[in-house]
Amino acid sequence: MQKRILIVSQEIFPYVENSQIAEHVLELAKKVKKNKDLEVRLFMPKYGCVNERRHQLHEVIRLSGVNIVVNDIDQPLIVKVASIPQARLQVYFIDNDDYFQRKLTLKDKQENLISDNDERMMFFCRGVLETLQMLGWSPDIIHCHGWFTSLLPLYLKNLYIQHPVFEHTKVISSLYEESLKGDLNSKLIDKIKFDGIDDDNLNVLKSPNLKSLQKIASQFSDGIVLEENYSCKEIKDFSEKNCISTLNPDEDNKDTYYHFYQNFFSEALV
């Protein structure tokens, strides 16, 4: 029986260009998919700059229409899907008219962080997990890429782990040297607590910057990958459990990640 790998990323090529993470994730998915023992799917946000016509996105009506409450406001979830023909990969997109219609990704034209990135991140991470529940697709491993996915391990372990879809799911976070400068909204902790999560570990998010987001991802992940050239010693020391220093999908070896994932299959499967 095939093992199921879900790759969740803040960016995926070709939908987002000129991004190290976007290209890295595509190469990873292509390499992993070559192993016939693995089934691979991907999720990313449906930013307004993603050209729906060119990439042939279409809405999955049966998965859309659920509301996700963010900061006490109901936000409708819209799910779209497309494929990368050359790689034969299926990509799901999390969309919402308030959060993802702007022709931007995570920064404005002046390279400043978008002011509601905290809520966009919350909506995206919960949207992925809600969509998996509706699909009934149980991943053995969820592999997260980029700071925008940092809350997914927290939500999985606190709000969704009792759902049958996630009964055997393990989560891995890849940490990158990213250009996230500055803090997100200082009320991020309060907004997360409104979701019913009141954990002492949330205190690390008092200053919601790149380091604190990577710490919260590490805290609730079963495994950590420090991607190439990662240098922050503080995070390395914090992320000792199941930490792999470097895995390079650009190397022509489809088994590199498969062997890494095998560390978790024995725990993930009965």
Image (cartoon, helix red, strand yellow):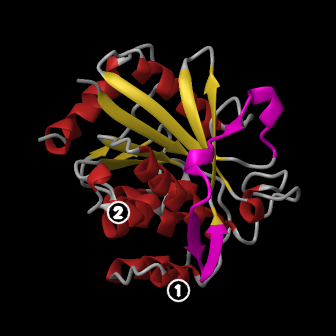
Position above or below: 34 against 51: above
N-term mark: 2 or 1: 2
- Residue 223 visible from this viewpoint: no
Position above or below: 132 against 256: below
Residue occupying image coordinates x 71% and y 71%:
116
Seen from the viewer's position, the closer of residues 62 and 83 is 62
Region of the chain picked out in magenta, as a range:
49-75
Q: Which mark is residue 190?
A: 1
- Reading the image, the residue beneath label 2 is 160
Residue at the right extreme of this rendering = 109
Q: Answer whether residue 27 is magenta in the image.
A: no
x, y percentage for residue 88? 55, 18
Judged left or right of residue 246, residue 52 is right
Seen from the viewer's position, the closer of residues 2 and 154 is 2
Task: Give residue 263's quadrant in the image.
Answer: top left
Q: Answer whether residue 51 is magenta in the image.
A: yes
Image quarter where the N terminus lies is: top left
Seen from the viewer's position, the closer of residues 16 and 248 is 16
Q: Bin the neighbour count of mark 2 within 10 Å (Cα to Cα): few under 14, some 14-19, many 20 and up.
A: some
Q: Secondary structure at mark 1?
A: helix
Residue occupying image coordinates x 49% and y 51%:
131
User: Depth-wise, is mark 2 or mark 1 nearer the camera?
Assistant: 2
Total marks in image? 2
**Residue type highlighted by circle 1:** Asp
Cα gap from disc 2 to disc 1, whole angstroms: 19 Å
Residue occupying image coordinates x 32% and y 57%:
239
Judged left or right of residue 53, residue 191 is left
